[in-house]
Amino acid sequence: MLQIQAVLRTEKEMEWWLSMPKVELHAHLNGSIRDSTLLEVARTLGEKGIIDFSDVEHVIMKNDRSLREVFKLFDLIHILTTDHATVTRIAKEVIEDFAAENVVYLELRTTPKRNDSIGMSKRSYMEAVLKGLKAVSSVDIAFIPYNEDATSLIRSLPTNVECNGATRKKIYVRLLLSIDRRETTTAAMETVMLALEMRHLGVVGIDLSGNPVVGEWITYLPALKFAKEQGLCVTLHCGEVPNPKEIQEMLDFLPQRIGHACYFQKEDWEKLKSSNIPVEICLTSNIRTASIQSIEVHHFVDLYKEKHPLVLCTDDSGVFSTSLSKEYKYAASSFGLGKMEMFELAKNAIEYIFADGSVKNDLRAIFASETKKLNL
Ligand SMILES: CNc1ncnc2c1ncn2[C@@H]1O[C@H](COP(=O)(O)O)[C@@H](O)[C@H]1O
Ligand SMILES: [Zn+2]
C-alpha cells in the first residue's frame, strides 16, 4: 500500500515537470531516438541479414556507457539510421517527443552526412530532416522563420491554440548543423555553406561536436570563423575532456554558447565568466559518461549561484534514457531548488536561443501565461 502511494506521488511529481514549459537548446538528432524505433530498425536490418540483431540489441539496451563507448554506439546508430526514410522518421518522432513534454522551443542539431553508395549528400540528408519536420501532425510546429507562404502563416501562430475544445501543443523548431570533429576543413566548410543556403528553412547556427579526443581546433576554425562572419550563431562542445589549450582557444573565439564545460580550470572559468558565454548544461550526460565524478560537484552549482547564463539540456535523450523534464527534476532534487526557481531557469533560456526577437517575444508570452496555469 505504502509502495503504491509512493509510486503515485512520484508520478504526480513528474507530471508537474512534464507540464512546465521548457526550452531545449542542446539535443543531437541521432542521440534522441526512441529505443523502440532503434530496435525496430535494427530488427528489420537483422531480418535482411545486414546486421546481427542479437549483438546490436545488447549494445542498444546497455545503460552505463563510458564516453568512448558512447561514440562507438553513435557509429552503430549511424549505420542503422542513415538512409533518407529513417532520417525523416526519426526527425518527426524526436520533435513529437519533445513537444509531448511541453518543450515550446527546440534547437535540434544534427551532422549532415554524405553517403555516395545510397545517393546521400549533406543536402539530401538535411532535406530528409526537413521532410520529418513537415510530417509532424500531432502538434503545431513553427520552423520557417519568415512567413513566406500561407502554410507558414498558419504554422507561426504565437501560442498554443484551442482546437475542438482541446489545446493543441505548439513547438518552435530551429536547426543547427553540426561539424563532426572527424571532418576536414573542406567538409566543415561545406556544412557551413549548406547552413547558409538553408537559413530560410530554419537553420540558425553551427555546432562543433563529435568525439572530443579526435581532431584539432585549427581544422574547424576557418569554417567556424566564416560562419560567424556570415551571421550564423555558433555553439561548441567545449571541455568535455581535459584539453587546456583548446578550451582557451575556443573561449577566445567567443562562440554564442558552449556545451558542457566539464574540464575547466581556474583561468577558463575566469574567461568564461568575463565573456558571459551561456553554457548548455547536460547533467545526466556528464554523469553517465563520467565527465563529472558526481552530481554534488557539478559546476551547475557555482554557475547558478553566480547567475552565469546557463540552460539545462538533454544532449542525447535516447542514448542516456532521459528527457528534459527529468533533467529539470534531477537538478531541482540534486541542488535543492524549488519549482519557481526551476521555472525561472527555463524561462531565462529564452534569452540564449539563436532564433530572432519575434520568437523570443512569443516565448516570453507563453511563459507568462503558463505562470498563471501552474499556480506559481
Ligand atoms: C555525449 N557527448 C557528446 N559529445 C560530443 N558529440 C556528441 C555527444 N553526443 C552526441 N554527439 C554528436 O552527435 C552525433 C549524433 O547525432 P547526429 O548524427 O549529429 O544527429 C554523434 O555522432 C556526435 O558527433
Ligand atoms: Zn552534445
Image (cartoon, helix red, strand yellow):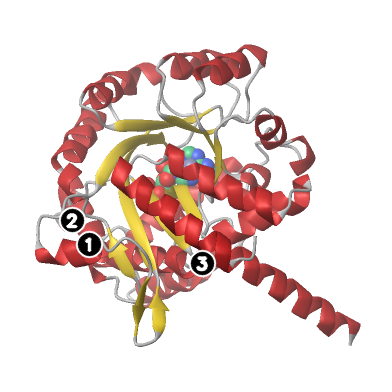
Q: Is residue 12 above or below residue 122?
A: below
Residue farthest to the right, as pictured: 2
Q: Residue at x 28, y 27 (%)?
A: 184
**Which of these two is toward me, 235 or 139?**
139
**Dot 3 surroundings within 10 Å: few (below 14), some, or many (20 or more)?**
some
Q: Give, as a three-letter code, the residue at label 2.
A: Glu
Does residue 173 appear left or right of residue 211 in this picture?
Answer: left
How many discs mark residues in the rendered view? Answer: 3
Please give the residue where the numbered disc 3 appears in the rendered image.
101
Let me know if residue 164 appears in the view: yes
Query: Picture coordinates of residue 128 (x, y %)?
Result: 21, 59
Query: Picture coordinates of residue 292 (x, y %)?
Result: 69, 36
Q: Which mark is residue 84?
A: 1
Quarter of the image for the N terminus: give it: bottom right
**Camera-side mark, 2 or 3:** 3
Does residue 300 appear left or right of residue 245 in this picture?
Answer: right
Tag 1 near tag 2, CB within 8 Å: yes
Upstream in sequence: badge 1 or badge 2: 1
Query: Picture coordinates of residue 77 (x, y %)?
Result: 42, 57
